[in-house]
Image (spheres, helix red, strand yellow):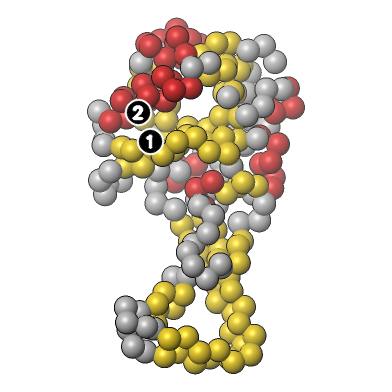
Amino acid sequence: MYKYLSEKYFQEIMDYGSIKIGTLYDFRRQEHLDGIRDEEEGVKELFKNYDGKHTIEGGPSGRDLMGAISVGAGATLAFEDVSLVNKVSSPDLFVFCLSSRCSKDVMSEFDGAEKCYEVVNVRNFFKRITASLGTVVPVRFRGVFPCKYGLRREEWNGVDYGLDPALMKGPDYSGQFEVRAIWEPRVEAEIEPQIFEARSLRKYVKEVYV
């Protein structure tokens, strides 16, 4: 996994183990550079078209229709030719973004990127970050996942909310080949990006010449 960044931030991790862990909602802010800012970060649209007549039973415990309509316990909902649409937003999460590919083309996707490093010890790298984040707010490390590129619009599968919106990106970002490390707070609280020094991180990365 590879990280593209400016000379300044590259030197900070190489010299001091200084790193910034962002948040999902922070990526929506206008002041971020191109390739980082994404105003639709963590949001997708669910839809379902019902053609003709339909009847849905609430059952003994009620039923939720993709968050758009709730059918109460024991109730029956009848409708005809209806389209349901609902926006689904991920809760805020700590996020660290990397790329699965190393090339000049990928680097050019990130405005201001001048340097690249590779994470050579993935397990210890994220274990150390998790420990540092835990001193600020209790977190659970979900893991590292590839982003899925395409329209942030998904037909409801009738069971759950489908793809995690925290891992969905628009097609304009597909050249980044992003993989995303995610930590979720264990408590309900507003979170902010964190910058900290962990000198041991220097052992887990190496410079890559692109």
In the rendered image, the residue lying farthest to the right is 105
The reply to whether dot 1 and dot 2 touch (C-beta < 8 Å) is: yes
The residue drawn where x is 60% and y is 67% is: 155
Give residue 133's position: percent from left, percent from top: 32, 29
Q: Tell me if residue 42 comes above or below residue 95 in the rendering.
A: below
Q: Tell me if residue 66 comes above or below residue 32 in the rendering.
A: below
Give residue 48's position: percent from left, percent from top: 59, 74
Residue at the spot of label 2: 130
The residue drawn where x is 53% and y is 32% is: 97
The residue drawn where x is 46% and y is 57% is: 89
Give residue 14's position: percent from left, percent from top: 48, 10
Q: Amino acid at mark 2?
A: Thr
Element at label 2: helix
Side (left or right) of 101 relative to 16: right
State whether residue 71 appears in this view. Answer: yes
The residue drawn where x is 65% and y is 35% is: 177
Depth order, front residue of 18/208? 208
Depth order, front residue of 193/145? 145
Q: Amino acid at mark 1?
A: Phe
Q: Residues within 10 Å of mark 2 (few under 14, many from 20)?
A: some
Residue at the spot of label 1: 141
Q: Could you give the CA–CA distance between mark 1 and mark 2, rounded to whole angstroms?
A: 7 Å
Quadrant in which the N terminus is drawn: top right
Side (left or right) of 209 relative to 186: right
Side (left or right) of 149 relative to 56: right
